[in-house]
Image (tube, grey):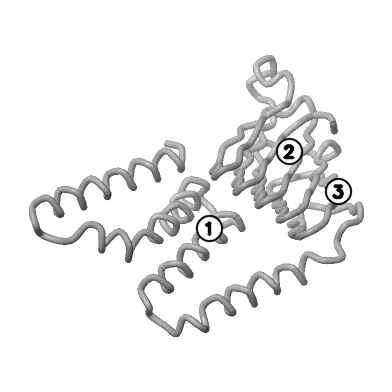
Amino acid sequence: MKPVRLWIGLVLLTLGVLGLLDASGVLDAGSAIDRWWPLAVVGLGVTAMLAQGSVSLGPVVITAIGIVLLVDQQGWTDQSIIWPTALVVVGGAILVGLGRRTVADHHDRPVPMVMFGGTKVRDDSDHLTHQAVSAVFGGATLDLRDAHIDEVATVDAFAMFGGVQILVPKDWRVSLGGTPIFGGYDDKTSGNGSLPPDAPVLKVNATALFGGVEVANQPH
């Protein structure tokens, strides 16, 4: 089941249960929703991680945002501390991402997170198994056209107010899925249906939060 569909189903189920409890006088559904709605954001992040079978940047960011909102709504700590702490985390991520906007060669190593800029990274690994690429308020291109997959490899792609493009050889089979939140992902590769059964497979776990992830054979 797709993570967004599972998340929507759980949210609707929860709202229905709360409505029934409110109608029976057990609790005030409006008050409960007002206090606990950030759990829906936390649940979306956790659901995405369970669907991917791994912990990647996109679902972690969504989960962290939900936790910050939950702490704020519950008043579990001084409100003057919550958002400065969130800004410190975001600022640290920005410092990590700054200055990495040039073309580089990587060999099966995670690609740095790009923020407020653009980058193109080429990976020509002989035995590619996993990669990760992220773009926040920017754009990132991961070029895998010179890489080799023995059987199966995965890519975790995260786009938040930005875009990620993944370039792959024409003889790879692409399996694209993920979590689009006011964003989307698109498989623009050619020949997926005409490839032999033993063609190498690239599984792309895409998280698009007000952004987009694209897999293609050639750059546009």
Q: Is residue 164 left or right of residue 71?
A: right
Q: Amino acid at mark 3?
A: Lys
Residue plotted at (46% across, 37% down): 2
Mark 3: few/some/many CA within 10 Å (<14, 14-19, 20+): some
Q: Residue at x 52, y 64 (%)?
A: 65
**Nearest to the observer: residue 203 or residue 140:** 140
The residue tagged 3 is 120
Please tell me whether mark 1 sits on a helix, a strand or a loop: helix
Name the residue located 83 percent from the left edge and 36 percent from the top edge.
145
Say which quadrant the N terminus sits in: top left
Amino acid type of the residue tagged 2 in the rendering: Ile
Residue 73 position, x and y percent, is 39, 70
Asked if 219 appears above or below 209 in the picture, the reply is above
Q: What element does badge 2 sit on?
A: loop
Residue that carries the numbered disc 1 in the rendered image = 62
Residue most toward the left? 24
